[in-house]
Image (cartoon, rainbow, N blue to C red):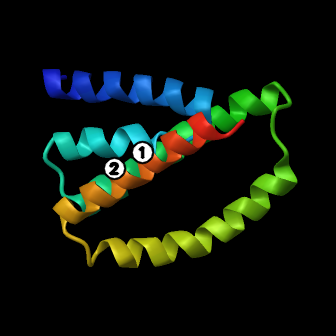
Amino acid sequence: MDMSLWAILGSGILVGLAASFTGLGGGFLMVPLLLFMGLSAQKAVGTSFLGILIISLSALVAHGKLANVDYRYGVWLGLGGVVGAQIGAQLVEHVSTQTFKRIFAFVLVSLAIFLIVKK
């Protein structure tokens, strides 16, 4: 295994830890990492989802063992997410990587402000 694969594996461990701890899925860390590695916005998003799928399944098992899962809410959120994911995948095809970075940064900053301000 070369160094870049070790770096990707190590990054995956950190993303998995953050995703399982925060419930944010890991894409908020994985997408910028993949963009930094030179992937286009479209490829970074798609690749991130594969990683998130694997991380999410593992986190679901861990949280399920701790009885921290409301399966009914999760299924309904997932069903809505299936529809949104199809629309989002089509939309990202029409956005340049530079514009995507700006939108992504805006979403992250907005979320941070919301979490800081919300009581």
- Residue drawn at the location 76% of the way across and 53% of the way down: 74
Q: Mark 2 and mark 1 in contact (Cβ < 8 Å)?
A: yes
Q: State left or right for residue 14 relative to residue 75.
A: left
According to the picture, the residue beneath numbered tag 1 turns out to be 109
Q: Is residue 62 above or below residue 73?
A: above
Residues packed near mark 2 inside 10 Å, few (<14), some (14 to 19) or many (20 plus)? some
- To which quarter of the image does residue 36 belong? top left
Residue under the image location 51 percent in, 27 percent down = 18
Q: Position of residue 45 (x, y in %)?
A: 34, 56
Judging from the image, what secondary structure is the residue with disc 2 in?
helix
Q: Judge left or right: residue 103 versus residue 78.
A: left
- Badge 1 marks a residue whose secondary structure is helix
Q: Can see residue 71?
A: yes
Q: CA distance from mark 1 to mark 2?
A: 6 Å
Return the residue at label 2: 105
Q: What residue is shown at x 37% (from left), y 77% (from top)? A: 91
Q: Is residue 8 above or below residue 44?
A: above
Q: Position of residue 84 (x, y in %)?
A: 56, 72
Residue 96 percent coordinates (x, y): 19, 69
Type of residue at label 2?
Ala
Up the image or down, 85 lies above or below 58; here it is: below
Q: Give residue 76's quadrant in the image.
A: bottom right
**Residue displayed at 54% across by 33% down:** 19
Using the rendered view, name the quadrant where residue 41 is placed: bottom left
Q: Is residue 79 above or below residue 47?
A: below
